[in-house]
Image (cartoon, grey):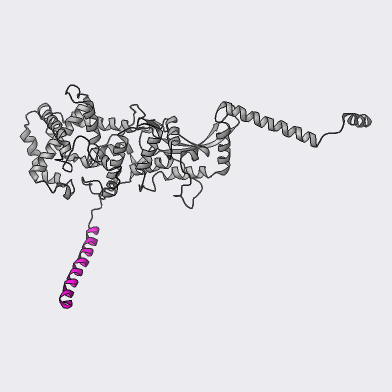
Amino acid sequence: MAGTSTPCIECCMKERFKAVMAAGENAKNQPQTAPTPKLQKVKFLLRDNKNFAKFYEPRVVSLGPIHHGKEKYRLGEKYKLGLTKDFVTESCENVTIEDLYKKIEEEIKALRECFEEEVTKPYDNGGLAWILFVDGCAVLQYIYYAVKKKFTEKSIKRASVAFWQQDLFLLENQLPYRLLESLMSLSKMKGKFRSSIRDFIKKNHNMVLGGGQQLPGNRERSEDSEPPPTHLLDLLRTSLLGPPGSQTKTKKSKIERKDPEWQSYRNLQELKAAGIIVKRSCIKTGNYLRSISFARKWINLLPGKYFNLHTGHISLPPMIVDDSTRPKFLNMIAYEMCLDFYNDFGVTSYISFLDSLIDEASDVKDLRKARVLYNFLGSDEEVAQLFNGIGTDLVPDLKAYKDVKYQIQECYDNIWMKFTAEFFHYHFRTSWTGLASLGALFALFLGATQTWFAVFSPDDCNDFCKKFTQNL
């Protein structure tokens, strides 16, 4: 038996060695340009968190092949068929439903390659083409109705509209943008559909960053200078991050730090006690997640030119927190963690930075007072738990906000400023505590003066007069 098993073992090992060498050759032959990420399921590392699993699955409507056919989305299928019918009848002139489907069928091989193989394996070409045809038409018509505010006249309930919108930005619910382009190319309203997509992304941008108002400066993708988007979630992420150079310039620290990655502060309260506060970033330069900066300034703690304190300001973009915040950010983070998506982990790095400032409800309260956070979720404690939960086990880009982090730590480590800031923070919080503190200091001064004169009392006045007249 030993003799017969040896050749089998040797053969098996040769196959293993061959697989290792082939893997090395495949790595060398990879293209220099980053490949387009494929549409795929959320990685198990994220799905293992039971508290977050539900935020990766649709609530009302399934789009694409991953969740297609599930019983709980049967009602959503009826909505999709109705929207598909509207797309065909309202926007396709001299183009039949058969022509639209044939267009997708002709491109099904390329569209299949937009997905990971395991996602489309259960479907033949015809079945996959039908799913993409219906879902693509429905998405385009939904976005058009959302921008033009036509849901009321179509008798579609507001709750369904809200859940639809949330489902559009789930990683496992994405459709290839190439599919949407193919369908728009046969429509007489292709210009209006492209414009509605831009407006829809801008609207969702302002629902995340905007402080409750429509703000100028939101980025529009340049079709000539940038690669085409992968899907709608990719479009939203790009809009929120802004251009790579959108981070506000921060002066570099003069002191080279031995351990630049070390962060000794725990939350915003500790920074506040050291004289570092937060404020809303200037929206004139654009309202993006990358719009984070740090600056040192002198501020007057009391009227007049005295009692100044050298402090630091962290500027953050205004952000709206509501029920859609968690699923949007979780799915953008899941997208950044896809193995075939080469990116700078911009959203992950932003959440990690924000999590470093928020540890408890009082941190959220200070951010609200600074108009950096707008809480439509519930209590400040709920918001703190939201960001602490999302920020767990993240691996951000260490270079993101590097200069900002250096200057915050440098300012926080300034012992004199920390002592001065803590003194003014606790004794001059309001005008009344400030007056009381000044009164106490004045009383101490009078007491010290009285004690000095009692110990080192001057000569008697008569002795002084005698000495004075003798000298005359």
Q: Nearer the viewer, residue 322 or 141?
A: 322
Q: Quadrant of the C terminus?
A: top right
Q: Give the mark count.
A: 0
Instruction: Give the left or right position of residue 122, taking residue 434 as reference.
Output: left
Q: Is residue 353 left or right of residue 140?
A: right
Q: As rendered, which of 184 and 47 lies closer to the eye?
A: 47
Residue 382 locus on image (x, y percent): 37, 35
> Hey, which residue is sitting farthest top in the picture?
153
Instruction: Work out which quarter of the rendered image holds the N terminus and state it.
Output: bottom left
Instruction: Say above or below: 409 vs 7.
Output: above
* Looking at the image, residue 460 lies above or below residue 344: above
Q: Is residue 254 left or right of residue 105?
A: right
Q: Residue at x 68, y 30 (%)?
A: 442
Identify the image quadrant of residue 104: top left
Examine the rendering and report whether any part of residue 242 can be seen.
no
Does the magenta portion include 296?
no
Q: Position of residue 131 (x, y in %)?
A: 12, 39
Q: Identify the residue shown where x is 36% and y is 45%.
A: 392
**With 177 as the anchor, is 443 left or right in this view?**
right
The verdict on residue 6 being magenta is: yes
Residue 452 screen position, x and y as percent:
77, 35
Residues shaded magenta: 1-29
Q: Which residue is depicted at the point 59% across and 29% down?
A: 434
Q: Position of residue 429 (x, y in %)?
A: 55, 30
- Residue shown at the point (13%, 49%) measured from the top left: 121
Q: Quadrant of residue 303?
A: top right
Residue 409 shows in the view:
yes
